[in-house]
Amino acid sequence: MRICPKTLPQKALLLGGLFPLLGLLAPGLPAQDDKGPRYVLTPVGKVRVLENKEAKKLLKEITPILKTKAARKNRKGKKGKKAPKDKGFLKRLETIEKLETLQHPSLVRVLETVVRRDPTDIVRTKAARALFAQPKKEARAAALRLLRDKSLKGRGGIQAPLIRILSRFGAPKKVWDKLRSSFLDLGPLAQIAFLESVEERRDWDSVDLLLDHLDPPSPENVDARENPPAEYWERRWKAWKAFKPALLKALEALFGRTFPSKKEAKTWIKEQGGLSRIRKKR
């Protein structure tokens, strides 16, 4: 077969244009080395993945900024003394906002330390949310550790993003059991986050909790001596008003409807043949 010399350059150009396409079509071929920045999509948006060298340099820069001790409570008898001004607050907040746009496993421990130790709840909450930008495995492990931290008990603003991380990335059944049993100890924002998780995961194990908190909180026996003080019930009522919309949405996700009271819900469930039959239909 004769090949015309004039057609050789044309064939070379044609083959040169085909090679990149072949690389895309054939999964076995190695991809081209892209030396540009790499981005991944996370629940908080697109974030840039850091190389190890870059992450190490960043940690060296931000550690002195974020290294701070939690504020100490004033001792009794020193009412005249004011707490020292937090001069580094804005700098720490800006640093956490920056970390919310970057991803690297080494950043998780830094954010976890800030959640535990920063003197301001604003920075601590921001750091908890920034865990969403980090690798799934490391972020989930940090959220699990932090939710076991007794110092965060009742701090709903900080607990809420941690619960949402577990709802998004997954958690063992025993973790949800623990959160369910300690529901009243969670702050209102964390209670809302938990109920949103019940809706998203269609958590049938939480049906009793939903029904128990469907009605406004009140003592069973008003005249009983062991009743908590009025302040307790006022706090419970305010929390109930805050989380009730999320509770109703969770009920609708499970049953396809809501109920005006626990009594009517129980009656309806019984009329439908019980929870087992309802679950099969849903």
Image: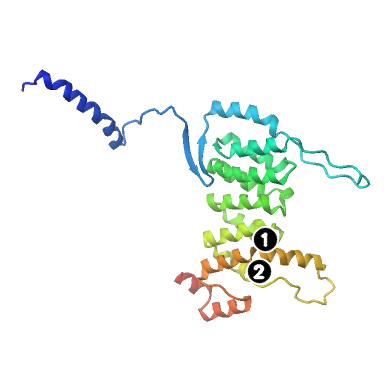
Residue 187 quadrant: bottom right
User: In the shown orientation, is residue 279 left or right of residue 140?
Assistant: left
Image coordinates of residue 6 in percent, x first then y, are: 11, 19
Q: Position of residue 44 (x, y in %)?
A: 54, 45
Q: Is residue 159 above or below residue 2?
A: below
Q: Badge 2: few (under 14), some or many (20 or more) residues near its Cα, within 10 Å?
A: some
Residue appearing at x 58%, y 76% in the figure: 265
As drawn, the label of residue 256 is: none
Q: How many marks?
A: 2
Q: Which color scheme is applied?
A: rainbow
Judging depth in this view, the residue of 4 and 206 nearest the camera is 4
Helix, strand or loop at disc 1? helix
Residues marked 2 and 1 touching at CB (< 8 Å): yes
- In depth, the one of 45 and 110 nearer the eye is 45
Q: Which amino acid type is shown beneath numbered disc 1?
A: Phe
Q: Amino acid at mark 2?
A: His
Q: Which residue is mark 2?
A: 213
Q: Residues within 10 Å of mark 1 (few under 14, many from 20)?
A: some
Task: State the quadrant of the N terminus.
Answer: top left
Q: Is residue 60 left or right of residue 273?
A: right
Q: CA distance from mark 2 to mark 1?
A: 10 Å
Q: Which image quadrant is residue 260 in?
A: bottom right
- Residue at x 63% of width, y 78% of height: 263
- Judging by the rendered image, the residue that carries numbered circle 1 is 183
Tell which circle, 2 or 1, labels the residue nearer the N-terminal end.
1
Above or below for 4 versus 110: above
